[in-house]
Amino acid sequence: MATDILSTQAPTPRSRILRLPRALWLALGAASMAGAIAAGGPLMIALWLAPDLAILVGLPRPFDAQGRMNSRAVAGYNAAHYLYGPSAMLIGAIVIAPLLPLGLVWLCHVAVDRGLGYYPRASDGSIRDV
């Protein structure tokens, strides 16, 4: 299609987003939270929202009227919501044991978000169509 060639917006990198059934994401989230609490105690529940702190970069207006995230916050938000970070932390836990509950709670956050239908944002801050 000619409009695709002339489009100035880059295509979304769909290959970087693992697509699983929502129920499977939620089961992974529940299992990883149980593991995080077992390994690090109930304080891990309080750390569950930590990946969403990237939204604060977009203050004082983190979202516009159309629901798009402030473009300053998108890169950090997306970095905190890909599986690379928790995976690296869990691998690092082989050597540094205290990373285990942190990696599990981060994995829980990402899995529950995806189970509820929230994925990393497109570069303009809009909700990505996955």
Image (cartoon, grey):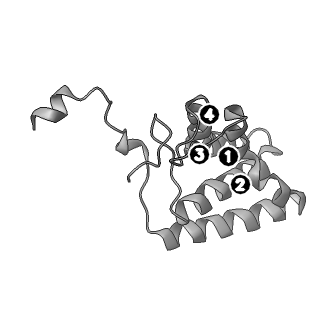
Rendered image: mark on residue 81: 3
User: In the image, 95: left or right of 127?
Assistant: right
Residue 94 place in picture, x, y as percent: 72, 43
Q: Quick one: label 2, few (<14), some, or many (20+) residues within 10 Å?
A: many
Residue farthest along the left direction in this orientation: 1
Between label 4 and label 3, give the one nearer the viewer.
4
Amino acid type of disc 3?
Answer: His
- Is disc 3 placed on a helix, strand or loop? loop
Q: Alpha carbon of mark 4 to alpha carbon of mark 1: how far? A: 25 Å
Between discs 4 and 3, the one toward the N terminus: 4
Q: CA distance from mark 3 to mark 2?
A: 13 Å
Between 51 and 43, the one nearer to me in the picture: 51
Q: Which residue is mark 4?
A: 73
Query: Mark 1 = which residue?
Result: 90
Amino acid of disc 4 = Ala
Q: Nearer the viewer, residue 63 or 121?
A: 63
Q: Quadrant of residue 104?
A: bottom right
Please name the residue that numbered disc 2 is placed on: 104
Q: Which mark lies nearer to you, 3 or 2?
A: 3
**In terms of sequence position, does the residue under pointer 4 or pointer 1 come before the other?**
4
